[in-house]
Amino acid sequence: MADRPDVLICDDSLLIRKQLRDILEKTCGLQVVEADNGVNAVEVFRQHWPKIVILDIVMPAKSGLEALKEIIEIAGDRRTKIIVASSAGTEENIKEAILAGAYDFVQKPIRRERIVPLVMGILDDAEGEAH
Amino acid sequence: MFMGLFGEFLLQKGYITAEQLRLAYGSVENARPKLGTLAINEGYMTSDQVETVHSMQVHEDRRFGDIATEMGYLSVEQLEALLSMQRRPHAVLAQALMDRKVLSMKDFNNAVEEYKREYGLRGDVFDALTEDDIDVTVRFCLQGKRILEHDLLMDYVSLFARSMVRFVDRFVVLCPAFPEEDDLASEYLALQLVTQRDKSSMLTAISGDVLSLAALGRAFSGEDITALDALGKAATEEFLNLVNGLFAVNMSDFGKNFTMHPPLGVPASVLEGMEKDLFAVLFRFGDFSMKLFVMDGVPKILEDRLLRDAQDCRS
């Protein structure tokens, strides 16, 4: 699993994918893969086994929450952390995501100060556990 | 938002030119209404008293308000009122125009009185407007329009206006516009259906000319967007998605659960035939403008058609 990418960004918005890629790849030097809907998210996850998935809730083809449940099932006991992102940070959405196994919830618009420490913290922890 | 409305009024009435207004907007960040000017304007202090305080400030490193209250020129309540006024948008605009020597305080006051007369504004409504109470401003801008009877849509338009101020342009101006007065002519719509659980959908859409939507996307995203290309369209859709997400959060606080469908970029023709049921509001920001369309209770058959057309358009 040495080639596992760090982050899978899954969002139907080209803007969000670009902005997150700019932050995580260009600024943080992470390896990033993308998907533009829930169906593709599951497929890309199956192919690449990224360490972290950033998953939008409102997406065509398959919602983020449906994709989340499938990814959790596929991942099994492999260490993958899923961060759910949405502009609709209602209590119900956050609760549903966390109950389904999400590691954290991020409110859109996603701020660099929020996402960078969250992602880097997860990767640091994973690194620590590996040694 | 009031700064934009009042700036436009000054322009329409010939108090200032478009160039002067643009330059004033550009300098409002640094314009801080002076307490002495406000105190004279409110009749709390004479110009001699203000001059005395200023001359004392030359020798003492103390604030205007502290000296004026100590000298008995101002009461604490008057000082608090002036400090509150200092933050009001039209006072900031007045200062920016005075700093640039475009208008005197007297001219500005005359314009304020003319504005109040023209719109029949009572003092409390005018105060709410100048305090940038967006709900009041939106109701004021849409007075006489049918949409005022729709509480849900009015809540939505207020939130949209707040988001325009927050994410796009603090000088945005809201103007009523309806399809019968202002047709749907536009090549592109960013559209999103928002469904209330067990109820029908609410339609939300934004449209505008290519340059305006690119400007909206650029201001909102901070990206270098100059055309309505894939990134420009994505930014426009994401802005709508953001507002709708905030709306869902606000509504959930009142026990109303809204589910959002993915935002879509579709041809304007998707809305053809729905003109009479749509409410349209025009937002102007700088040289640009965009229209917001809202409709509560989208008929099921139209909802299905919209989603199908939109899906076809996307694929």
Image (spheres, rainbow, N blue to C red):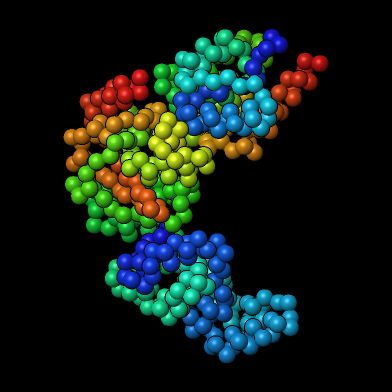
Q: Residue at x 43, y 67 (%)?
A: B20
Q: Position of residue B175 (x, y in %)?
A: 31, 54
| Depth order, front residue of B79/A13 | A13
Residue A121 against residue A127 in the figure, above or below: below
User: Image quadrant of residue B236?
Assistant: top left
Residue found at x 32% / y 35%: B188
User: In what quadrant of the picture does the N terminus of chain B appear?
Assistant: bottom left
Is residue A118 shown left or right of residue B146? right
Residue, far right = A131
Name which quarter of the figure residue B50 lies in. Answer: bottom right
Residue B241 visible in the current orientation: no
Q: Is residue B305 left or right of residue A127?
A: left
The residue sitting at 46% across, 52% down in the picture is B169
Quarter the C terminus of chain B occupies: top left
Q: Position of residue A73 (x, y in %)?
A: 56, 10
The image shows residue B85 at horizontal and vertical percentages of: 51, 70
Whether residue B106 appears in this view of the structure is yes
Q: Quadrant of residue A74?
A: top right
Q: Nearer the viewer, residue B132 or B17?
A: B17
Residue positioned 45% across, 74% down in the render: B102
**Residue B185 versus residue B168: which sits nearer the camera?**
B185
**Of all residues shown, which one is farthest toward the bottom?**
B48
Q: Is residue A106 above or below residue B97?
A: above
Q: Is residue B138 left or right of residue B83?
A: left
